[in-house]
Amino acid sequence: MTIADSTIDHRVFADGILSIGLTLPLLRTGTIVADFREQVVLATLADTLGFRALWVRDVPLNSADYPDPVGHLDPWVLLGALASHTNQIALASGAIVLTLRHPLHVAKGAGSVQTLSNGRFMLGLGSGDRPPEYAAFGRDAEERRELYRAHWETVAAALGGTPQVIPDRRPEDAPEFMLLPRPPLPVPMLAVGSGGQSVDWIARHSIGWMTYHREPETQRSRHSMWRAAVDRLPTPVFRAFGVAMRLDLSDDPHEPATPLSLGYRAGRHALVALLDEMRETGTHHVTLNLNSERPVREVMEELAAELLPVFHE
């Protein structure tokens, strides 16, 4: 089986290979209002250029107290638009806040995107980490670990190979429910962040683990912890490890890498070296959160010309 004809999760995550994706919205430094019609155009360009995945965040509410001032579209609305304007690239949620949404609504949205995209969707799920946001939705932040596990189970049942709707309550006269239309393929489910769970729980239930970039020593420690959890599984199986990384790509290709919060500023040669080291230490996918004063299209085209041929075998 080749990368081209495998399922979408195996096109993004493969043993010994590092694939590269992009996180939406794609904005220049200092831009806090996204033109989402332009974002769809840039997503189409990313598809044409050969990036492996587009990642969409779920930011239900904004606040002046939050570090991210950008207003994000509802992820299901944006994913529907992306499904209709792209052809090959994987679409991924990074991540749906599972604890603040009803799991049957999450399953319905995921199945819908999987159908529209013809099997190109990966459902990344997180728990959120802002107690005031939990309060705004009438949830108790102290219950997020239990909510995450319970909601995951309901979503997994609804999207699996033999779909089953697990209702919150089942009166004696309740009919058997189903989610239609059924997507062409089961939806891969991916843990983004820990969701308050152990790495052993994530390894048992998820196709992999996506984390934010950390400084190299911490990242190596996290990866070693993940590999140990995968090795403890009763049956040997591939489990992916991915990283979301901020990137300020210098217009000087020889500029050395300088650490930033959750990423780097670097020229392309230093970036290739960084990514190559990540590949060698077992990272399977990196999604880049572009943050540069350079025009976004220019950065995308440089990455496609200079990086993708190195890493996308």
Image (cartoon, rainbow, N blue to C red):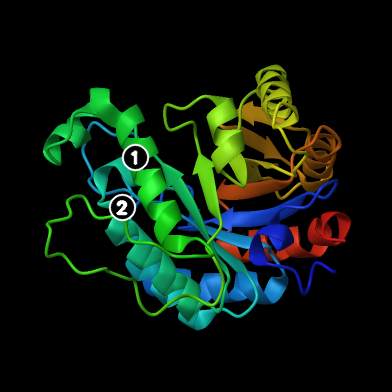
Residue 113 image point, x, y percent = 44, 71
Q: Are marks 2 and 1 in contact (CB under 8 Å)?
A: yes
Disc 1 marks a residue whose amino acid type is Ala
Report whether 207 appears left or right of 115: right
Q: Which residue is mark 2?
A: 103
Q: Nearer the viewer, residue 82 or 15?
A: 15
The kind of secondary structure element at disc 2 is helix
Q: Which residue is mark 1?
A: 150
Residue placed at 17% from the left, 51% from the top? 169
Q: Looking at the picture, does residue 12 appear above or below residue 63?
A: below
| Disc 1: CA contacts within 10 A as few (<14), some (14-19) or many (>=20) | some
Disc 2 marks a residue whose amino acid type is Pro
Residue placed at 14% from the left, 33% from the top? 135
Residue placed at 58% from the left, 70% from the top? 120
The quadrant of the rendering that contains the C terminus is bottom right
The kind of secondary structure element at disc 1 is helix
Residue 147 image point, x, y percent = 30, 36
Q: Nearer the viewer, residue 86 or 101?
A: 101
Q: How many marks?
A: 2
* Residue 75 appears in the figure: yes
Nearest to viewer (mark 2 / mark 1): 1
Q: Looking at the picture, does residue 224 appear above or below residue 182?
A: above
Residue placed at 78% from the left, 33% from the top? 256
Residue 204, quarter of the rendered image: top right
* Residue 38 appears in the figure: no
Residue 93 image point, x, y percent = 47, 55
The quadrant of the rendering that contains the N terminus is bottom right
Q: Nearer the viewer, residue 176 or 239?
A: 176
Report whether 72 appears left or right of 295: left
Report whether 150 appears left or right of 64: right
Q: Which of the two discs, 2 and 1, labels the residue nearer the N terminus?
A: 2
